[in-house]
Image (tube, rainbow, N blue to C red):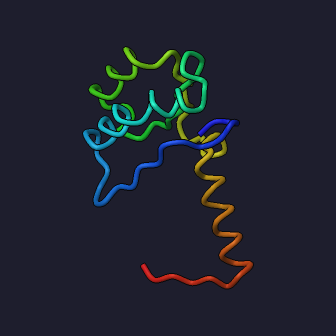
């Protein structure tokens, strides 16, 4: 996601691990950056989740991303997806939407 929009979204069936995450990066990161017209200037933001910090993922990012934003441990306020989840929860509450898990 960027200030200009959101591009490739990937739906995951099952559990995400470092191999699934790496596959998503390979298939979507550069294409999304290109579609958002930020391909030479984007900075990858990811938290300190073990799959993000796995050696195979860090190595791929090192060679394929122009820059990576270093993340402090336990910093959910900087994670944009946390704000999306909060917004969705507020909308659910406003409209009394319920769902089964």
Picture quarter with the C terminus: bottom left
Residue 96 in the image, given as x and y percentages of width and height: 67, 85
Left or right, 92 with respect to 10, comes to right
Q: Is residue 65 above or below residue 91?
A: above
Q: Residue at x 64, y 65 (%)?
A: 88
Point 65% across, 75% down: residue: 92
Of 54 and 36, which appears nearest the observer?
A: 36
User: Looking at the figure, which quarter contains the N terminus?
Assistant: top right
**Quarter residue 74 falls in:** top right
Q: How many labels does the image show?
A: 0
Q: Where is residue 20 in the image (x, y as percent from the top left)?
A: 28, 43
Residue at 60% across / 41% down in the picture?
Answer: 75
Q: Is residue 27 above or below residue 66?
A: below
Side of 96 relative to 34 (left or right):
right
Residue 27 horizontal/vertical position (percent): 35, 35
Name the foreground residue: 63 vs 8.
8
Residue 48 placement: quadrant = top left
Residue 23, horizontal then vertical, whole percent: 30, 37
């Amino acid at each position: 996601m960027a200030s200009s929009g959101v591009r490739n979204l990937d739906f995951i069936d099952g559990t995400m691990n470092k191999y699934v995450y790496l596959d998503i990066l390979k298939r979507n990161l550069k294409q999304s950056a290109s579609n958002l017209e930020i391909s030479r200037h984007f900075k990858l933001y990811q938290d300190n989740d073990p799959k993000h910090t796995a050696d195979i993922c860090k190595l791929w990012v090192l060679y394929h991303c122009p820059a990576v934003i270093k993340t402090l441990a336990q910093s959910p306020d900087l994670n944009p997806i946390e704000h999306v989840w909060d917004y969705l929860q507020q909308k659910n509450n406003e409209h009394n939407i319920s769902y089964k898990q």
